[in-house]
Image (tube, rainbow, N blue to C red):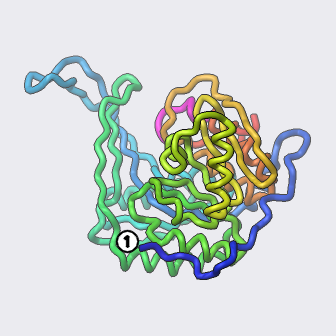
């Protein structure tokens, strides 16, 4: 049972952004450098094994991969935080990891990335790993290792979250359904009471737990799981409007892959066409989108300008292999 806000009225609406993008279309580095984003959620280690396939196994009809190179990258909420730092912002990460080799590797990678870690450790937790085996830039197999964190560790994270609120401008919830956001409803209520905008990258069909969020960023499959299959654009608009009213979302940004993205807010609906020239790998693209939004809102940009820049960032990152980032120079090239 999730904690629900105790106030019977809607949360106070925090204005989103006030400083439009200059006519040059470039936001100064110093402006982005002042943005302070707190990312909360499920972290994981994205582990890649690269090798060649030259034969089929005599034991079973499967390819034999001769692994020649291994690479570890930050995944989940940690990739979101890394994306924020790549754009020049200040990013903190509140998360739970285990006392194991993948957990230590995540700490090492966070230190290299410039993300400020606020980490709770659970001795009984297996730090989540997504192991991908690739040959000639094609993914052959993915193996996942994971379990859920302990209740006591999650309560400690909730207390730490309240302590971190005053020193951050934007709160970003990155939900991968690994248990790190068990108390997300309470966190959103506390952040909104403190006047902080809250962005949510959702998971699953229980969006009641995200009630009162400033902005939620589902993809088509995630939104369909909650509102059902829409029959037309008009039907989609009606379903989103009802959802936003019921759950008190200021805005919803629907990411639509090759169709771009559509923003639904109190100011109306705005669509941005996809900008990708070549789609190479969509894994982690949602992380880049919501991280870019958080940085731009933290820097004071209006929501519509933040969405336009997030769409541009998405078009860049899908041209890269695996979980990747877009840096300042790429975004404003």
- Residue 7 position, x and y percent, is 64, 81
- Specify whether 29 is left or right of 121: right
**Rendered view: 135 above or below 87:** above
Q: Residue furthest top?
A: 54
Q: Is residue 298 something one can see in this rendering?
A: yes
Disc tally is: 1
Residue 148 among those drawn in magenta: no
Residue, disc 1: 121
Q: Is residue 78 something one can see in this rendering?
A: no
**Rendered view: 95 above or below 303:** below
Q: Nearer the viewer, residue 294 or 183?
A: 183
Residue 321 among those drawn in magenta: yes
Image point (55%, 26%), residue name: 279
- Residue 207 position, x and y percent, is 52, 59
Residue 85 occupies which quadrant of the picture? bottom right
- Residue 116 position, x and y percent, is 56, 65
Magenta stretch bounds: 316-324
The C terminus is located in which quarter? top right
**Rendered view: 140 above or below 303:** above
- Residue 82 position, x and y percent, is 56, 52
């Amino acid at each position: 049972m999730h904690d629900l806000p105790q106030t019977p009225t809607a949360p106070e609406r925090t204005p989103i952004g006030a400083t439009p993008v200059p006519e040059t279309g470039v936001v100064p580095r110093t402006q982005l450098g002042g943005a302070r984003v707190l990312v909360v959620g499920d972290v994981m280690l994205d582990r890649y094994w690269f090798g060649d396939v030259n034969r089929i196994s005599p034991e079973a009809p499967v390819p034999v991969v001769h692994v020649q190179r291994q690479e570890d990258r930050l995944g989940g909420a940690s990739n979101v935080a890394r994306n924020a730092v790549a754009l020049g912002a200040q990013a903190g990460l509140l998360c739970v990891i285990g006392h194991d080799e993948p957990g230590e590797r995540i700490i090492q990678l966070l230190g290299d990335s410039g993300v400020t870690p606020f980490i709770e450790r659970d001795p009984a937790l297996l730090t989540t790993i997504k192991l991908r085996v690739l040959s000639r830039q094609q993914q052959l197999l993915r193996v996942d290792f994971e379990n859920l964190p302990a209740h006591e560790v999650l309560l400690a994270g909730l207390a730490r979250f309240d302590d971190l609120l005053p020193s951050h401008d934007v709160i970003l919830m990155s939900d991968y359904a690994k248990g790190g956001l068990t108390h997300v409803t309470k966190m959103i209520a506390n952040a909104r009471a403190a006047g902080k905008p809250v962005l949510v990258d959702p998971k699953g069909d229980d969006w009641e737990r995200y009630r009162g969020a400033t902005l939620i960023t589902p993809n088509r499959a995630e939104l369909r799981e909650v509102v059902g299959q829409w029959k037309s654009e008009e039907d989609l608009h009606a379903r989103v409007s009802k959802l936003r009213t019921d759950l008190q979302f200021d805005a919803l940004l629907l990411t639509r892959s090759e169709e771009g993205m559509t923003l639904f807010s109190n100011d109306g609906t705005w669509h941005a066409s996809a900008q990708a020239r070549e789609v190479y790998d969509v894994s982690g693209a949602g992380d880049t989108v919501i991280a870019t939004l958080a940085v731009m809102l933290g820097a004071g940009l209006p929501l519509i300008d933040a969405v336009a820049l997030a769409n541009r960032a998405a078009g860049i990152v899908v041209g890269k292999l695996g979980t990747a980032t877009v840096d300042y120079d790429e975004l404003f090239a």
